[in-house]
Amino acid sequence: MSRPGRNAEHSVLPLIHDRTFEPRYGEPVRLSPLVARLTAPNASPFTFHGTNTYLVGEGDLAVVDPGPEDEAHVRAILAAAGGRRISHIVVTHTHRDHSPGARLLKAQTDAPIVGADVHRPARPLNVGEINPLDAGGDTIHVADRVLAHGETLAGDGWTLETVETPGHTANHLAFALREEASLFSGDHVMAWSTSIVAPPDGSMADYMASLETLMARGEGRYHPGHGGPVEEAQAYVAALKTHRLAREAAVLERIAAGDGTIPAMVKVIYRDVDPILHGPAALSVLAHVEDLVARGLVLSDGPPSLTARYELA
């Protein structure tokens, strides 16, 4: 049986990424009266120009996602604060490009680390399964205060509301800035690219449910973990949903055509994508297949994996 809402009518919206971005490393970029952005110099095919750190507030500050373990970037955060007190260090999720800097910043400010809980997979590992994403997880992260859906943080003229958005990771959170009707979306929604959803760290079922959570809200601008702002965010999230449903349909089509393995599916579905990204693409297909197996639409010859064989139910 399919999950509620997955077969509902939806508009076909084009998903158009915006890759225009000037990182201006070491320099705070003012985005709104309450938000400034610093970008860490950790560019890669998966982080774009680097991880965005946000300073929220005019007096006391919240720092959202201090980034990787980079002392120079932490010094840039402190310089951008300009002597203002950092009251909270907020972490959206525990990938190593987002959370390790929190420990460095806490050592300099004694501000509490709040937000995401400890790093964990979205599901238990299958017998004999190795987590290919272990190197990306910040497994020693510990928050002073774990935030749950709906909980708030408040400072001098700002309020952050916690929005649980699992999918990219099991512990992923977004944070709505009530005073500006904007949202810090971490890696869940980004303008420059779709988010990687890769088992066992990530879950496509959770990711799709989290898109629904955001579509039920009203924020019109997102500040993502990488790249520039997501403008007209509600339309963009709807387009992301349409894109993921199209990927799901493509997976079902390939299985129906006899492509019973994930490498065979990736070769066709991602034929126009740089082969260097076919590894992450395979994990994305696995996320779709796991969801389809759980919904009874696809059969697997064992636990869903990169090496299993699949057929339509």
Image (cartoon, rainbow, N blue to C red):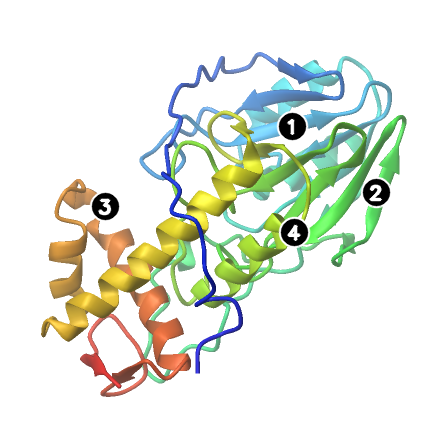
Circle 2 SS class: strand
Q: Which residue position holds label 3?
A: 277
Q: Mark 3 or mark 4, which is nearer to you?
A: 4
Sequence-wise, which precedes: disc 2 or disc 3? 2
**Quick one: label 4, few (<14), some, or many (20+) residues within 10 Å?**
few
**Quick one: label 2, few (<14), some, or many (20+) residues within 10 Å?**
some
The answer to the question of whether label 1 and label 3 lie on touching residues, with beta carbons closer than 8 A, is no
Q: CA distance from mark 2 to mark 3?
A: 38 Å
Q: Is residue 53 above or below residue 138?
A: above
Circle 3 SS class: helix
Mark number displayed over residue 54 = 1
Q: Which residue position holds label 2?
A: 153
Q: CA distance from mark 1 to mark 2?
A: 15 Å
The answer to the question of whether label 2 and label 3 lie on touching residues, with beta carbons closer than 8 A, is no
Label count reads 4
> Which quarter of the image is occupied by the N terminus?
bottom left
Q: CA distance from mark 3 to mark 4?
A: 32 Å
Residue type indicated by callout 1 = Tyr
The answer to the question of whether label 1 and label 2 lie on touching residues, with beta carbons closer than 8 A, is no
Q: Which residue position holds label 4?
A: 216
Sequence-wise, which precedes: disc 4 or disc 1? 1
Please identify the quarter of the rendering in which residue 218 is found.
top right
